[in-house]
Structures are given as structure tokens and as C-alpha cells.
């Protein structure tokens, strides 16, 4: 008797493409946590990582209990070592396409033309921050130009903080940053004019409001130099009419766009995520465990939750990994029950079950 696992293994060998039980696309906190969970569950796992983490410009990871302030690269290096320590594999590269094959498994093709096969996919590709088109913002992104007060507020506490308004959430954002400094200025830029009640709240919190569009950032002043920027730190904001206002940190609201291109070939599209009347970006819909509308495909981290911080993405990866393992276990159990009911001897039945379980554990 030839099992499904044997059939797909033979096909993989004929194609010259390595087969894994789970292929994970994206090697950030979510992907590595999912890989660690699955590797410890004795599943064969491959992580494909393009090496472009969203938080690369940041000095450290914050709000991650036990790893507070750890440089992002150091955290990922530790995660990779843990995954490979349990037998997981990691390859540097970009997953270009993914498709479901007639047999029900998946084929992932990398940018260099190599391909791998998988029974399940976990996509943790994160998102892209689309920054406001203000000169100087991109150059100082993740340093003095910030987006999340919980990620960066402590580091700029008591400094002169500017908030660049680009949508209906501008007032809310300014009020949030007021927790970390008594010197906050809201630059309305392209945001709508606040209502009377909003102006009252801003005034009650001593937040200055500047009308007009911002044309660029000003550097210099008394701030310490930053070798990474090869120049002085942010010192102010320049308006289109020539006015300048002092500012040591600038908070922005980028548009958050899920890196979902790999999912297009599987029929998964993104949906807009809105807050307070402002579309903040796009994400891939999934259930609480990360399962998408396509059977066999899971997502975790910022690709499905735009607001997830590093520790939350790691937890989401664990949840998705455990859900994938449970799904595989159900399938294996159903196969074993079917084999038990088949009309052949107990010895053959036992051999088939052992072969299926053994193949799964070794990625065959």
C-alpha cells in the first residue's frame, strides 16, 4: 500500500525539490516563534527570511519582558539559534511566489529560482511603513522620527515633541504623546481642522497647534551628534511659509501596508484596517489562531495585525505554530483511523501508521 506521504515524497524527489511539513515565510519575531514551536513539536520546518526586519533602524526592542532594550538584530540572532538548535532550518532569500499543487500541498519559489514543497504555510512577512512625503522624514525614521509612544516615548521623554498631522487621528496622537512630555506641538499639516471640543482638549493639555503644511525638517542645535546619521540631530520643523519651530522628536502616522504579495497566488487579498475614521493601512484577515480563508495557510504578526508590537508578534507566532501542529495531528489521526478500518492485517496496519508518523517527523 502506498501512502499519501510516500506519494508526495516520491514526487518531490523527482522534482529535485526539498519537502518540509511547514514552510514559514518571514524570519522576524512571529516567524521564528512559530518555527520554534513547530520544531519542538518534532515537525520539519524551513524559515525563508529576506533579512529586512521592519524595526532594523531602532536601537532596541521595548515592552518585551525580559529582553527590554535588546537590539533587534541581537534578538533575531538568538531566535535563529534556538530554532536551528531544535532542528529547524533557516535560509536567506526572498519567497517570490506560492501556489497550491494538485495534490493539496504547496510549492514556494524563491527569487533565485529554487523551490521547496510544504504541507502547511505560515506567512509572517510583516508590513511596510509608507512615510509622509516630507523631506528628512525617511532619513531619520526610527531615530528621531517615531510612530509609537509605547515603543519610543521613554527615550524622548521631556523633549520637545512634534506631532505631524496627516489624518483624523492627529489630535488623539498629540494627546497620547503628552504623557511623555509637557512640550508637545501639533503640526496640522494635512490633517483636518480640529473641532471646538478637540481644541479645548488640546488647550487643556497645553498642546500648541500650528496650522499650515510642513515643508521639511531642520537639523543642528544643541543636540548630540549621531554617527549613524553623519550629522546633527533633529532640531526643528520648517513650514511651507518659512516659519520654523523647535522640535527634538517628531511623531508621525505612517500608512501600514501588509507585505502580502506572496499570498496573491493563493487567492488571499488584503482588507483595510480603520481607526477613528482614518484608514491606517491594509492587512490579511485571519482568525484568532492565524488561520486564513485558504485551508493550510496561516498568518501571524504585523501582516495580519498592524498594531502588534514585537512581543505580541512573537506570541502570535506561537499560537499559529500550535494551531498548525494541531491541524496536522488531526489529519494524521484521521489517516490512522482510516488505516485501522481498512481490510488488512494488524501487522500491515501498524507498519503503515508508523511509516506515516515517521515521515511526518522527518519532513517526508
Image (tube, rainbow, N blue to C red):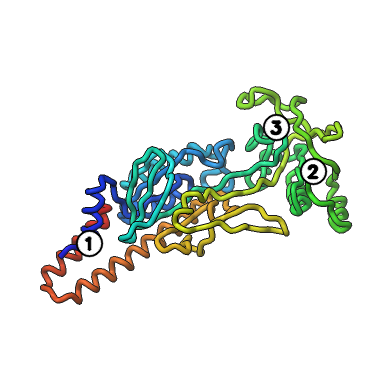
Which quadrant of the figure contains the N terminus? bottom left
Q: Is residue 249 above or below residue 346?
A: above
Q: How many marks?
A: 3
Where is mark 2, residue-wise?
189
Q: Is residue 193 above or below residue 356?
A: above
Where is mark 3, residue-wise?
136
- Relative placement, left or right, of 160 versus 349 is right
Tag 3: Cα neighbours inside 10 Å, few (<14), some, or many (≥20)? Answer: some
Place residue 132 in its image quadrant: top right
Tag 1: Cα neighbours inside 10 Å, few (<14), some, or many (≥20)? Answer: some
Which residue corresponds to the image point at 47% horizontal and 64% vertical from the top-left? 293
Name the secondary structure under disc 2: loop
User: Which sits in the foreground, 172 or 242?
Assistant: 242
Label 2 to label 3: alpha-carbon separation: 15 Å
Task: Give coordinates of residue 343: x percent, y percent.
Answer: 14, 76
- Relative placement, left or right, of 252 versus 117 is right
Which residue corresponds to the image point at 70% horizontal and 28% vertical from the top-left? 233
Task: Give coordinates of residue 237: x percent, y percent.
Answer: 79, 34
Which quadrant of the figure contains the C terminus? bottom left
Tag 2: Cα neighbours inside 10 Å, few (<14), some, or many (≥20)? Answer: many
- The numbered mark, 2 or 3, whose residue comes first in the sequence reads 3
Amino acid at each position: 500500500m502506498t501512502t499519501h506521504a510516500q506519494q508526495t515524497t516520491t514526487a518531490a524527489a523527482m522534482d529535485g525539490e526539498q519537502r518540509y511539513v511547514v514552510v514559514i515565510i518571514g524570519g522576524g519575531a512571529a516567524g521564528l516563534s512559530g518555527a520554534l514551536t513547530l520544531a519542538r513539536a518534532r515537525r520539519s520546518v524551513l524559515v525563508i527570511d529576506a533579512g529586512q526586519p521592519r524595526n532594523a533602524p531602532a536601537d532596541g526592542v521595548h515592552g518585551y519582558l525580559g529582553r527590554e532594550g535588546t537590539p533587534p538584530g541581537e534578538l533575531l540572532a538568538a531566535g535563529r539559534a534556538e530554532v536551528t538548535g531544535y532542528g529547524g532550518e533557516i535560509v536567506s532569500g526572498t519567497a517570490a511566489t506560492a501556489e497550491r499543487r494538485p495534490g493539496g500541498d504547496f510549492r514556494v519559489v524563491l527569487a533565485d529560482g529554487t523551490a521547496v514543497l510544504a504541507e502547511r504555510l505560515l506567512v509572517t512577512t510583516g508590513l511596510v511603513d509608507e512615510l509622509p512625503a516630507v523631506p528628512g522624514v525617511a532619513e531619520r525614521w526610527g531615530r528621531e522620527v517615531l510612530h509609537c509612544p509605547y515603543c519610543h516615548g521613554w527615550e524622548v521623554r521631556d523633549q520637545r515633541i512634534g506631532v505631524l498631522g496627516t489624518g483624523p487621528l492627529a489630535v488623539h496622537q498629540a494627546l497620547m504623546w503628552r504623557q511623555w512630555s509637557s512640550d508637545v506641538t501639533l503640526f496640522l499639516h494635512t490633517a483636518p481642522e480640529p473641532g471646538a471640543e478637540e481644541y479645548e482638549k488640546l488647550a487643556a493639555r497645553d498642546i500648541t497647534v500650528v496650522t499650515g503644511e510642513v515643508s521639511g525638517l531642520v537639523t543642528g542645535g544643541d543636540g548630540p551628534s549621531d554617527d549613524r546619521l553623519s550629522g546633527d540631530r533633529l532640531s526643528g520643523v520648517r513650514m511651507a511659509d518659512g516659519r520654523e519651530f523647535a522640535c527634538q522628536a517628531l511623531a508621525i502616522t505612517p500608512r501600514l501596508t501588509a507585505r502580502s504579495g506572496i499570498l496573491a497566488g493563493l487567492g488571499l487579498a488584503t482588507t483595510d484596517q480603520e481607526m477613528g475614521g482614518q484608514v491606517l493601512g491594509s492587512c490579511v484577515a485571519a482568525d484568532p489562531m492565524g488561520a486564513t480563508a485558504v485551508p493550510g495557510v496561516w498568518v501571524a504578526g504585523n501582516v495580519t495585525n498592524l498594531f502588534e508590537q514585537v512581543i505580541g508578534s512573537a506570541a502570535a507566532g506561537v499560537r499559529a505554530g500550535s494551531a498548525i501542529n494541531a491541524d496536522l495531528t488531526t489529519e494524521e489521526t484521521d489517516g490512522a483511523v482510516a488505516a485501522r478500518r481498512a481490510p488488512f492485517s494488524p501487522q500491515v496496519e501498524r507498519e503503515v501508521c508508523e511509516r506515516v508518523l515517521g515521515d511526518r517527523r522527518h519532513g517526508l
